[in-house]
């Protein structure tokens, strides 16, 4: 670490400020401000899910699909709908066998 004289402090502060600004610009380029998440209305959500609007209303009334409601309007977050789809994923036979094998191995180790 370099020692500065009192006379060198203004120049050192200016240099430090310039480097800090440069780092902030680099960070903003790598991680831009959070973009607003896509919000769908009923027809957009139905199209995204490849469902009819009536089917989507039925799923909403059964609380099967994630939804937000303001007044009489329904809103759907794209990320929540995508996660809902992922949660319904069926495992492959290979995945089931692998999990079963891990469970059997885990039980054998405990004995």
Image: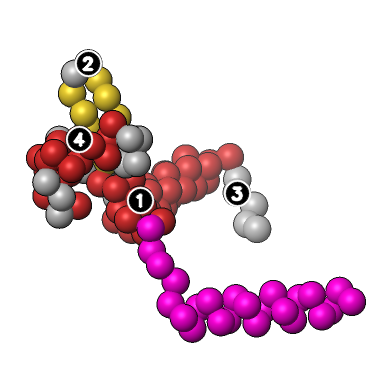
**Whether residue 69 is visible:** yes
Residue 57's disc is 4
Residues shaded magenta:
88-111
- Residue found farthest to the right: 111
* Colour logic: secondary structure
- According to the picture, the residue beneath numbered tag 1 turns out to be 84
Q: Residue beneath label 2, please?
A: 71
Disc 2 is placed on an element classified as: loop
Give the residue at mark 3. 4
- The tag earlier along the polypeptide, 4 or 2, is 4
Mark 3 or mark 2, whichever is nearer to me: 2
Residue 58 in the image: above or below residue 29: above
**Residue 30 position in % (x across, y down):** 33, 58
Quadrant position of residue 97: bottom right
User: Do residues under tags 1 and 3 come within 8 Å of each other at their CB atoms?
Assistant: no
Nearer-the-camera pick, 39 or 21: 39
Q: CA distance from mark 4 to mark 2?
A: 16 Å
């Amino acid at each position: 670490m370099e020692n500065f004289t009192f006379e060198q402090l203004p120049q050192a502060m200016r240099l430090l400020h310039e480097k800090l600004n440069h780092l902030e610009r680099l960070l903003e380029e790598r991680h831009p401000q959070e973009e607003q998440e896509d919000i769908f209305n009923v027809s957009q959500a139905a199209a995204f899910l490849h469902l009819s609007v009536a089917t989507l209303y039925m799923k909403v009334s059964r609380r099967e699909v994630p939804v937000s409601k303001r007044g009489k309007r329904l809103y759907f977050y794209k990320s929540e709908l995508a996660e809902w789809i992922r949660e319904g994923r069926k495992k492959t036979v290979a995945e089931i066998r692998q999990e079963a094998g891990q469970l059997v191995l885990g039980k054998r180790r405990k004995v």
